[in-house]
Image: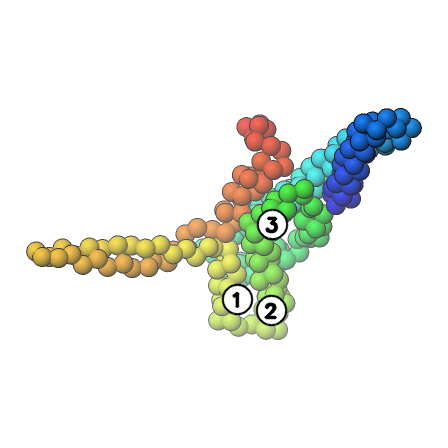
Amino acid sequence: MTLYRNCLGWTLFISFISLLMAFILDCFGDSVWYDIFIGTFSSGFLTVITSWIGYLRERNRVMEEFYEETKKMLKMLNEYPFDLNIDKKIDFFLDFSKFDISYWNRAYGDMSFICPDSRKYVYNKIYSPMMDIIKTLNSHSDNFRRHRNGTGTNDSVMESYIAEIEMKMHCNEEYVVEHVEEYPEYKVKHEHIVKSNSSRSVDKISKELNGRFYDIMCGKSNKKGK
């Protein structure tokens, strides 16, 4: 995407300068240089069209790869057994740690949008939250393996590792609850901050993936046909 984006920018610039110079030279009646700059503009404009088509095709390919790889990981995380025992959870984490994220990382690395805000959005809403879960999980994978093969069995430590990963899979949200006490001459308002972890990170990532990210990838007009 970077190559096509840069080529598009430079050819647009050259085409604009060529057209401007041709207009100026035409005013001075210099037909020779006018023809040269018009020819440069024509070839440059053709390159703009081919660069734009190439950019769109490459952008769709990269975003579709990122989309599919993210969906695979979200599908696995949605099958996480929150209500099962430690061993089952450890088995799940070990299976997930075998997932090859190189294609996913490469797809994100290849993203180079004309609008920089699009890449920033993908990083903040999808890539970074997902990578946070993956890094936390992988940081404990060796300990999980030692626990499973019996060389490092410690249930309490495993529970703390699992709790840390599960916290990454949830979004802790805070909201304010107001309570008003009424008296004959005045009122007293109390505010309590309540924390909730009912909102899952994987659900938020999935919502972004199938929401704004899909709009960028395919356009809002194609969303109904998804």
Q: Residues within 10 Å of mark 2 (few under 14, many from 20)?
A: some
Quarter of the picture holding the N terminus: top right
Percent across and percent down for residue 72 are 62, 45
Q: Residues within 10 Å of mark 3 (few under 14, many from 20)?
A: few
Residue visible at 69% across and 46% down? 111
Percent across and percent down for residue 7 are 78, 41
The first of marks 2 and 3 along the sequence is 3
Q: CA distance from mark 1 to mark 2?
A: 9 Å
Kind of residue indicated by mark 2: Asn
* Side (left or right) of 40 relative to 8: right
Residue visible at 64% across and 46% down? 116
Q: Quadrant of residue 49?
A: top right
Residue 83 seen in the figure: yes
Q: Quadrant of residue 172?
A: bottom left
Q: CA distance from mark 3 to mark 1?
A: 30 Å
Q: Which residue is mark 1?
A: 161
The first of marks 3 and 1 along the sequence is 3
Q: Is residue 185 depicted above or below 33 in this figure? A: below
Q: Which residue is mark 3?
A: 120
Question: Looking at the image, do the residues carrying marks 3 and 1 touch, with CB atoms under 8 Å apart?
Answer: no
Residue visible at 74% across and 37% down? 55
Q: Residues within 10 Å of mark 1 (few under 14, many from 20)?
A: many
Kind of residue indicated by mark 1: Tyr
The first of marks 1 and 2 along the sequence is 2
Kind of residue indicated by mark 3: Lys
Q: CA distance from mark 2 to mark 3?
A: 34 Å
Q: Which residue is mark 2?
A: 143
Percent across and percent down for residue 158 are 52, 68
Question: Looking at the image, do the residues carrying marks 1 and 2 touch, with CB atoms under 8 Å apart?
Answer: yes
